[in-house]
Image (cartoon, grey):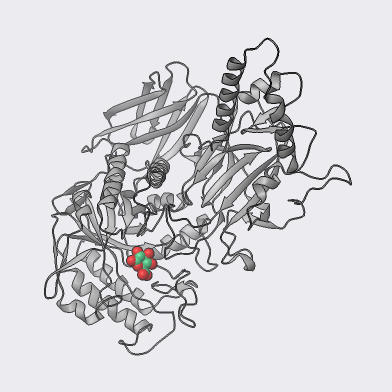
Amino acid sequence: MLKALSQHSSEPALAICHGVVKFPEATGPLREARAVGAFVPSLLWAPPGVSMKYYMFLLVLLFLLAALANAAPGPSALIANIPGRAIVNLDGAWHVIVDPFEDGTSEGFFRNEKPQNKRDRIEYSFDASPVLYVPGDWNTQREQLLFYEGPVWYRREFHYHKRANIRTFVYLGAANYRAVVYLNGEKLGEHEGGFTPFNFEVTSTLRDGDNFLIVEVDNTRRADALPALKYDWWNYGGITRDVMLVEVPPVFIQDYWIQLARGSQSDIAGWVQLNGAQSPEQVRLEIPEARLRETLTTDAAGRASFRFPAKLELWSPEHPKLYDVILTSGTDAIRDQIGFRTVEVQGASILLNSKPVFLRGISMHDEAPFREGRAFSPEDAQTLLGWVKDLGCNFVRLAHYPHTENEIRLADRMGLLVWSEIPVYQDIDWQSPATLANAEAQLRDMIARDHNRAAVILWSLSNETPIEPARLQFLKRLAQEARDLDSTRLLTSATDRLDETAANVRTLSDPLGEVLDVIGLNEYVGWYWLRPEDADTMQWKSKWNKPIIVSEFGGGAPFGLHGDADQRWTEEYQESLYQHQLGMVERIPNLAGLSPWILMDFRAPSRVLPGVQDYHNRKGLISNRGQRKLAFYVLQQYYKKLKDAGK
Ligand code: GCB
């Protein structure tokens, strides 16, 4: 609003943008300072005929509005099913400026200035700066950036042809950790959280012709961030997932939720949300293969809820049936592939399509096979989930943050059940309202992106969080939020609190258990405590009559290091640890599944042991070069045995 006002005033030609007064003829970082300096004294006098009191009131209002304009705008509501939309891909080589002293904002990097004459002093140049590829982390693209934590400015110039009746959004699949996004020098907004997508509408900011998009990405760790200061994976920075422009009609299908009604295998239920609708609109929902054609009418908020009978083959790991689903409203049409299944807990069992299911799983990071770095491509997903299938799994724990959409969609097609998690990892700032709001936002965006995927059965709220009242309050709020957003999936968390209730007896007693549907248990018998063979006599109890997934156990061994079974770091030690563990887990009451730690070795900054770790967590069953360790075959055999026994 401020901007519009100032654009219409005649003299002097000021533009007030994000709370900063700009004189258009000035260039460079001194511009704002000069402008404010010249402007302030003249403000102290009310114009003739205007009362001083009224004038002061106006001034205060003006500055309040300017401050408001300066507050970081958040992204707009997430657009669902990006793979099903008309897009302009902005991946590729982006020029970048590494900005360790955080000069970029005051220097005005977001303006992408270029000297206009030989006297101009502009102390940066995107054109002359090197490039990084998007999507991709910066750490593995340039050697000097392997350990870098700080801001990097990305710029992409592009040509765009504007057309009538098209709204355009810029969409980023993920940027780790904090991103500030500018288009043509205007700040679109900010986003926090390294693994969730976000979008901003740019219909009016885009120009017909040349445009430039600038993203400041900062991966500095912070005590109040999620994850916080300490975590056991690499802090890969950068624009790590695809960037694109998404083109939609003025009224478009922003999001939808189509699945079996809770507790039913014969009705589908859900909603469709339009964006831009001024009046009730019709939405057609079709599942041609199921001969389903329904017309819905949206309410004043652009939303239509529905429930009707449908005869559908159920999705399961053995039969990952997906249906083409088509939604049409006005000039917008979108197609998706959706599977239909139910999941629930009955006593201590997990039921999939009303039958007990045992989760034969493995944990994995979103780390690229063979080349290391952040995974992003369909090929990465294919390799990683291909290995998961080779192990004989029907389940995968995608730790410790939301993975790429490619992976989840592939899991849908492959028939892999998924645990998806937000990075509330170990100790975070439980007291901070901003941290809670951040966790809620990451949870919302994870659910928003993947709520139509049959593969996802578990939303995980946290991993190994300490027992304390503030933490319980925090996680209860998240659980409530998750249930409000999605009452059809199960809630879990990986816990690690064990009480020694008798000699050789460990009892799960984390009070968080009360809040969860399924309890995740990270136990490292034979690695962080006791010896592998101590597992043979260990007994287990649980305070909660709920399903338990052993969400982590494991031990480190670089591929090819051989020795005795009691020699730490050897493949034989890891193999023996798995053998003892698999004997023990069967004595855990209510055991509903396993996801040992971990599919593949991954980079981790605290793993410094030379010749063994070299900044890698070596608990993978497969090395980062794709070599299978002895323990891989132990778990593979065990899963085969379970499968053959009908589990
Ligand atoms: C854990 C953490 C995981 C670590 C793993 C380990 O308990 O959940 O992030 O990487 O242990 O290897 O220590």
Q: Nearer the viewer, residue 232 or 63?
A: 63
Q: Position of residue 399 (x, y in %)?
A: 38, 58
At x 65% / y 22%, what residue is drawn? 4
Q: Quadrant of residue 622?
A: bottom left
Q: Nearer the viewer, residue 374 or 430?
A: 430
Say above or below: 398 vs 120: below
Task: Judge whether residue 313 can be spotted in this image.
Answer: no
Task: Judge whether residue 339 can be spotted in this image.
Answer: yes
Furthest-top residue in view? 49
Q: Position of residue 406 (x, y in %)?
A: 47, 51
Q: Nearer the viewer, residue 432 or 426?
A: 432
Q: Position of residue 296 (x, y in %)?
A: 37, 22
Q: Is residue 593 left or right of residue 69?
A: left
Q: Nearer the viewer, residue 393 or 3?
A: 3
At x 14% / y 78%, what residue is drawn? 537
Q: Is residue 126 left or right of residue 101?
A: right
Furthest-left residue in view? 502
At x 73% / y 56%, what residue is drawn? 129
Furthest-right residue in view? 118
If the image is split into quadrants, where does the C terminus sit?
A: bottom left
